[in-house]
Image: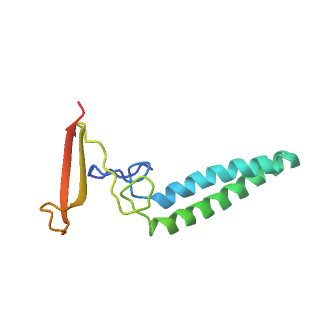
Amino acid sequence: MADKHYKDDNIQHGIDDNPKGDAKKGAALGGAGGAITGAVAGAPLGPGGMAVGAVVGGLVGAGASGAAVAGVDKIDNDNNVTGVGDKIAYDKDSDNTYVSTNETYVDTDNDGEYRRVETTEVRNDD
């Protein structure tokens, strides 16, 4: 089942750029890894051990990974790749425009009082 399409807002939402269904994705990956690990662990017992190991490993891997990702997904930041911090990771626009905003504090008139100055850089990388 394919994910539903969503409007591209030019923010990098995690590794796959889709903030939806993270727990399902984690369960699928955990299930696949668990099945492989279980099959390898059960292989010394023969084909039956390999099959049982794959099934048990897949179920345990899917359940554990899905639950872990669901727990983290409640508190992570879906607006960047790492999921931590409060920064937003912007996608490169289709026209290759790069926007960066920085803020600094500057004593503009040497009176000892620092004022916030925001600078924005816009660059076209075409």
Left/right of residue 75 with respect to residue 6 in the rendered view: right
Q: Quadrant of residue 98?
A: top left
Quarter of the image where the C terminus is located: top left
Where's residue 95, x and y in %? 22, 36
Residue at the farthest top position:
126
In the displayed structure, would residue 125 be above or below residue 71?
A: above
Where's residue 66, x and y in %? 56, 62
Where's residue 99, x and y in %? 23, 46
- The residue drawn where x is 52% and y is 62% is 69
Left/right of residue 67 with respect to residue 114 in the rendered view: right
Question: Closer to the camera, 42 or 85?
Answer: 85
Q: Quadrant of residue 27?
A: bottom right
- The residue drawn where x is 71% and y is 55% is 55
Question: Closer to the camera, 101 or 37?
Answer: 101
Where's residue 24, x and y in %? 50, 58
Left/right of residue 43 with respect to residue 37 in the rendered view: right
Residue at the farthest right position:
45
- The residue drawn where x is 61% and y is 55% is 30
Question: Closer to the camera, 24 or 1?
Answer: 24
Q: What count of labels does the image hold? A: 0
Question: Closer to the camera, 8 or 49?
Answer: 8
